[in-house]
Amino acid sequence: MTPPDDALRAVEATLFAAEAPMSVDEIVAYVGEGLDVKAALAALQNHYAGRGIELVERGKRWHFQTAPDLAHLLRKEREEARKLSRAAVETLAIIAYHEPVSRAEVEAIRGVQISKGTLDVLMEAGWVRPAGRREVPGRPLIYATTAAFLTHFGLGSRRDLPGIEDLKAAGLLDPVDFAFEQQLELGAADE
């Protein structure tokens, strides 16, 4: 068995040199089976807490990132981000909350057709990926979010997405929709 300091150093070096976030199994493939990688990750996460960089887990993958309170320092050289269209934002939300979902299902939820370009933009951003085909006639392609989506939005998993009550409390849902929803509920209660 390798001494604990060597385990910490090996895991730290592997993550530092990695091009992308790594799963525990990927780290084990680099450092070897004889090391307690999970314990090393916990120790490193504790060691880097409150520092300029931190070790985080997003979507069961580990990586170093700039501390959130210092991120503004690195934005000076940042490329101008493209804004997503309303259709793209709605499509991304539907995929995130209902994945895996087909294009027809997204259109049924949105109530309008989506252009192929909308899904292309989301896939180009690395937030959405094809997730196979639905086992129904026509075998439509289904879509799901990626680990990059979780990382970009600071989510550990899809369970961290805000719920309807959170969205209402933040004022992010249209009050007209609530009024319509309440009228439907009242009408159903009267029957």
Image (cartoon, helix red, strand yellow):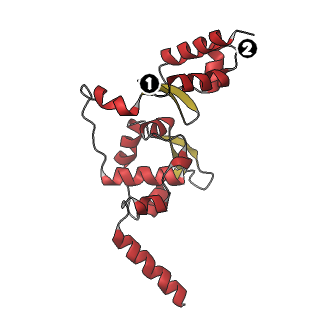
Return the x and y of residue 127 as percentages of the image width and height: 44, 40
Residue position marked by numbered label 1 in the rendering: 51
Q: Residue shown at 46%/80% (left/top)?
A: 184
Residue 78: which quarter of the image?
top left
Q: Residue shown at 46%/36% (left/top)?
A: 151
> In screen coordinates, is 32 left or right of 175?
right
Around disc 1, counting alpha carbons within 10 Å, would you say few (fewer than 14), some (14 to 19), or many (20 or more)?
Answer: few
| Figure disc tally | 2
Return the x and y of residue 80 as percentages of the image width and height: 24, 34
Do the CB atoms of the residues marked 2 and 1 lie less than 8 Å apart?
no
Whether residue 29 appears in this view of the structure is yes
Quadrant including the C terminus: bottom right
| Residue toward you, 171 or 157 | 171
Specify the amino acid type for callout 1: Arg
Q: Earlier in the sequence, mark 2 or mark 1?
A: 2
| Separation of residues labelled 2 and 1 (CA atoms) | 29 Å
**Disc 1 on helix, strand or loop?**
loop
Tag of residue 117: none
Q: Residue shown at 43%/41% (left/top)?
A: 153
Return the x and y of residue 98 as percentages of the image width and height: 53, 54
Residue position marked by numbered label 2 in the rendering: 34
Specify the amino acid type for callout 2: Gly
Return the x and y of residue 55 as percentages of the image width and height: 51, 26
Around disc 2, counting alpha carbons within 10 Å, would you say few (fewer than 14), some (14 to 19), or many (20 or more)?
Answer: few
